[in-house]
Amino acid sequence: MAAVIGWDIGGAHVKAARADDGRLTRIVQLACAPHESVASLEQALRDAHATLGDAERHRVTMTAELSDAFESRARGVVVVAAIAAREIGVGDILFYAGERGYVARDEIGANVDAIASANWRAAAELVARHHADALFIDIGSTTADLTPICASRVAAVGASDAERLARGELAYAGFSRGAPQAYATHAPVAGQWTPLVNEGFASMADVRRVLGELPEGETDADLSPTTDGRPKTVAASRARLARLAGCDAADLTDAQSRAFAQYLARAQLRAIEDQIALLESREAMMWDAPIVGAGVGRKLAARLAQARGCAFIDFAELIAAPPALAEKAANCAPASALALLAE
């Protein structure tokens, strides 16, 4: 069998997975910022290609078209596809269009809506091959995708981001990116309810770091720069979070800072739980099914499964690979799925 590389081109990361003879062999994840410069996306693709090498086949999905670098999603799909084709260079390149399957570059114009942000479905299709009934939750750095699997089929109702947000199948509640005050307007701080400052002082990565869920320094779960350019340390994260409450880190004890972070983490989890509640309101859903979790934030999916009293299955368990590679595959589920589904 020929080598195949699955590409998931996002607005914050480029993720790519290589499969040889039907088995994953290498995975890479790189940060990019097309909203600042499309050149950063080009460079990330170039670097990922250099790391994974040439392959006979390439299968591409994307969410980068949502970047405000592009005046519309449709324009974004066309431009990102052109960049991918140029930087990948060699091999058979097809673009994933959800239920429509794969399309060639000259068919992109007629399929932009199906191609835009379809990466969630690729991973869900792989899950459906392993589990007849499940709720698949992929929590990445920025969003949480919630996809019902029923009778070994992807049972999502929405296709576009707008439809999926309205139907309970998408939440902008990621593990490390995004603003904590998106999930709460007030928080208990040092014994009193405190209105939160609606400024970009902190990110969810700061919440995770204060809670010990992210180590200090850069990791695959937190490749984005900090909001203030200061280090990725617990002390710096405490200072950033304190500003959301209109104070300095020195104004809060360690316990008070941790309690503040814990409240923000719970508020975000409730945003995901609300989407699950919407899914549960559908008559056809089977909610004794397990939760399958993927993404850098899948430990949150495990907590949701525990709270609902159902089984949890790690996406990594679906990947026939050494543990370290399977872990990376679960972090980059859509790219990994494209590489494996192509076989």
Image (spheres, helix red, strand yellow):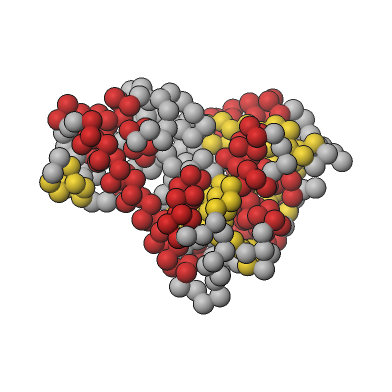
Identify the residue shown where x is 77% and y is 39%: 23
Q: How many marks?
A: 0
Examine the rendered structure and indicate whether residue 316 appears above or below residue 33.
below
Q: Residue at x 28, y 46 (%)?
A: 263
Relative to 56, 131 lies left or right:
left
Q: Quadrant of the N terminus?
A: top right
Q: Residue 63: x percent and y percent?
A: 55, 47
Which image quadrant for residue 231?
A: top left
Q: Position of residue 304 (x, y in %)?
A: 45, 54
Residue toward you, 330 or 90:
330
* Residue farthest toward the left in the current orientation of the protein: 192
Decide if residue 54 is in sight here. yes
Q: Is residue 179 left or right of residue 90?
A: left
Give the percent coordinates (x, y) of residue 319.
Answer: 69, 43
Q: Residue at x 35, y 24 (%)?
A: 233
Q: Residue at x 63, y 51 (%)?
A: 123
Please indicate, yes or no, whether residue 59 appears anywhere in the rendered image. Answer: no
Residue at the outermost right position? 1
Q: Position of residue 340 (x, y in %)?
A: 74, 46
Is residue 92 rendered to the left or right of residue 276? right
The front one of 282 and 96 is 282
310 left or right of 25? left
Q: Quadrant of residue 20?
A: top right
- The one nearer the camera, 213 or 173, is 213
